[in-house]
Image: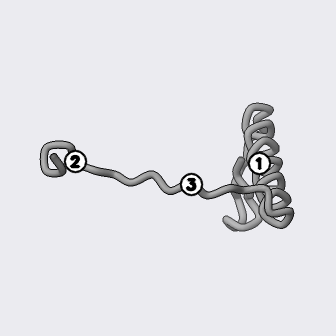
Amino acid sequence: MVYTRKQGDNRHSFYSEVGKRQKTNTLQLENDLHLALSNQQFKVYYQPIVNLKTTL
């Protein structure tokens, strides 16, 4: 979506239902992540990255 007001005069913008849906989905994901973080719903697992050729 283009916000013409920020771009100045004599600009055009086009409405896109797909763009609106994507923005809504992104906003919902961000809100869900903030909520999960504030409710301490994340678990951190350590997974080492090793090179088997040099480790063995």
Q: Is residue 39 above or below residue 21?
A: below
Q: Which residue is mark 3?
A: 45
Front residue (pair 44, 37) = 44
Q: Secondary structure at mark 1?
A: helix
Residue 29 has which mark?
Answer: 1
Amino acid carrying mark 2 in the image: Asn
Question: Which mark sits nearer the N-terminus, 2 or 3?
Answer: 3
Alpha carbon separation for disc pair 3 and 1: 22 Å
Q: Is residue 53 above or below residue 9?
A: above
Q: Could you tell me if the residues under marks 1 and 2 are in contact, i.e. CB atoms within 8 Å?
A: no
Q: Secondary structure at mark 2?
A: loop
Query: Which residue lies at the image location 72% right of the left edge and 56% below the top edge?
Result: 42
Identify the image quadrant of residue 5.
Answer: bottom right
How far across and how far down the image is residue 32, in percent?
Answer: 82, 52
How far across and how far down the image is residue 15, in percent?
Answer: 78, 39
Q: Which residue is mark 2?
A: 51
Alpha carbon separation for disc pair 1 and 2: 35 Å
- Between tags 1 and 2, which lies in front? 2
